[in-house]
Image (tube, helix red, strand yellow):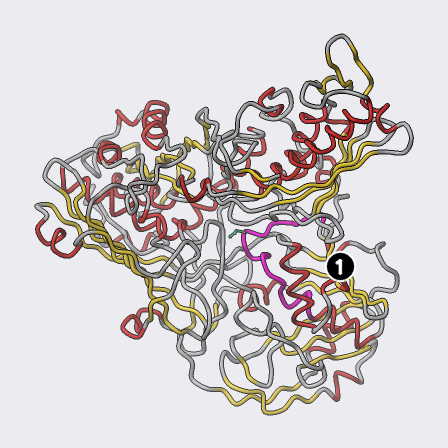
Amino acid sequence: MKFESPATTNPIDQLKIVGQSVSRIDGPLKTTGTAPYAYERHDVVANQAYGYVVGSAIAKGRIKSIDLGAAKAAPGVLAIVTADNAGKLDKGRLNTAKLLGGPEIQHYHQAIAVVVAETFEQARAAAQLIRVDYAAEQGAFDLASLLDKAKPNPITAGPADTAVGDFAANFAAAPVRLDARYSTPDEAHAMMEPHATIAAWEGDKLTLWTSNQMIAWNKAEMAKILGMRAENVRLDSPFVGGGFGGKLFPRADALLAALGARAAKRPVKVALQRPLMFNNTTHRPATIQRIRIGATRDGKITAIGHESWSGDLPGGKADGAVAQTRLLYAGAHRMTATRLATLDLPEGNAMRAPGEATGMMALEIAVDEMAEKLGMDPIEFRILNDTQVDPEKPERPFSQRQLTECFRTGAERFGWSKRNPQPGRVRDGRWLVGIGAAAAFRNNLLTKSAARVRLDNGGIVTVETDMTDIGTGSYTIIAQTAAEMMGVPLEKVKVRLGDSAFPVSAGSGGQWGGNNSTAGVYAACVKLREAVAQKLGFNSAEAEFADGEVRSGNRRVPLAQAAADGGLSAEDEIEYGDLAKKYQQSTFGAHFVEVGVDAATAEIRVRRMLAVCAAGRILNPKTARSQVIGAMTMGVGAALMEELVVDKRTGFFVNHDLAAYEVPVHADIPHQEMFFLDETDPMSSPMKAKGVAELGICGVAAAVANAVYNATGVRVRDYPITLDKLLEQMPDVG
Ligand code: MOS
């Protein structure tokens, strides 16, 4: 089905099942510990051996020699694979560094060997006996010292640089100006489930039971790396214990399980050991950002500029921190620029809302600072500079844009009017209390997605698509879509996901999964409805599918009857025309945060949070809310805790475990609320939905920073906002 004109009324609009707060259909599997995650799939193939990954102990240089002798002779060892004996491997397209390093080393903890043994303990013990002689070289590990050498680099959302009007002249001439520098640190996905894979060969066919967000990408990628035909690779990833962008690409577990299994001639399972995860896999790269805003005295932005620097391995990519500044606020004269420095740290790549997440951390503090310079309320300043058209291309309207409504609704619900605009004036016992707000913004991406739907003679509808559920609720919203379309209750729908044998979906990334994957299921259901109508002698344009029946005029036939002689199935794909070119499709929100800052120690506690979001039709308010409050929590982590600490002498992230890489726990998040505005977006798909899962993190950290400023009068521009950055300037509260 080609979606090329705005959606009109369709069966989804009944909202009997779609749009309802249905509990996850996979909830019982998850809560009883019976959802099969990759490493636990003991029953998919017999005789599984264990692989243990060895990571490089240097960040840059060469392996001079590896002594495997003692390890090979250790009890239970079946095989050891290194770059020396792995055969020819392609680098692949999706990752910047090789998944199996050596003799050249590109980053610390790059995998250099996998030891395969009968048991995990034997593999681990043998791995300690490998002796590696390195020739280390000095690498580049300090972004701040390399800004002058950084080069323009395009971002996912467009070119490296954009320019409209004459920014320099109009910024210089503006009566009120802000010019400030912000920084965000390297961050880790820190998902619960590590990257894990079981690999088995049958002749030249490879099966990978793995944990992955994008099945089709990774099937093609594994085939490319291994020099195989794609049809000989199968991936199966029905449950993913968190990805956040870290599982968009295959990582060392998948390759080393495949190579280990080939060498040991039996199935092999590999999970990346937790202490290896932080330096072996990808992370969100650190940024340094400069923001300049010029405005008239009454608060109209006349010039806005955003430059961002990040670093990556040679051939890597830049963080897209400037992306939202191209779209969020009006202003006739504008510029953005993205610069990439070469670093020898582990590979930077996508992490939840890549680009906007870091960009909003800086931009939304800058906006708060600018409002203060203007003597304006920061929400009124944002509303004054709201726009209904793409500020870089005014002929393109937004498909839907309720940023102002998000702020108005949120301000009312949160009690914004009680905020004291004078910082450091509100006291609650030992706490200085402050309130802050920030906009949320993330684009809505359209990408084709296919599904197959089958009706059996018991009236059961089975959906198959290689879509993944990374904890987001895909199983549930897909079941709701098929139930609504086929007129059956939810219990009559079975959903099978994550297998590369199924039709290719949008996959889970960039908050595009929900809208696109359900639109693909919609397309397949439209075809199945036609097949059913034809089989039962109905005119498909008139037939109504409801309560397990097909109806037209006064004729009603049970749906299952269409499958009486063996079952009907249909497959289709949603494909998009140019609605995303003609209309800018984005999602919007407003974040509100109240913090308390200990007047003596500067300890920061979040007291309450609210997000108001406008993101098209919400397919399931319960699962969507879970996504947003999870993202808000991650935003608090980014604001106050998360930082991969770089050892700038030897080039690795020091805090490479879940004890030292801090993320919020329940006690850090006392009170969260979120609210969706009513919205349907006919430009996005027949579902009229958009993404929410990345929107929810965008802006949160800045709202926390702005609240800390309101509480204390101390402006911290370098994340995370830890108490050492506040202490010296804390107000004297004697
Ligand atoms: Mo997302 S960072 O595209 O999984």
Q: Quadrant of residue 624?
A: top right
Q: Residue 440: percent from the left, percent from the top? A: 38, 40
Check residue 365 for magenta coloring: no
The CB of the residue at mark 1 lies under 8 Å from ligand 1 = no
Question: Which residue is at the far bottom?
Answer: 64
Q: Residue at x 47, y 64 (%)?
A: 348
Residue at position x 77%, y 54% from top?
40
Q: Residue reaching furthest right?
A: 565
Residue that label 1 marks: 234
The image shows residue 170 at horizontal and vertical percentages of: 12, 51
- Looking at the rendering, the stretch of residues picked out in magenta corresponds to 238-255
* Image quarter of residue 488: top right
- Residue situated in front as seen by the camera: 230 or 40: 230
Q: Label 1 is placed on what type of residue?
A: Arg
The x, y position of residue 529, in whole percent, is 73, 28
Q: Is residue 580 visible?
A: yes
Instruction: Give the answer, above or below, for where 231 lies relative to 78.
Output: above
Residue under the image location 23 percent in, 47 percent down: 714
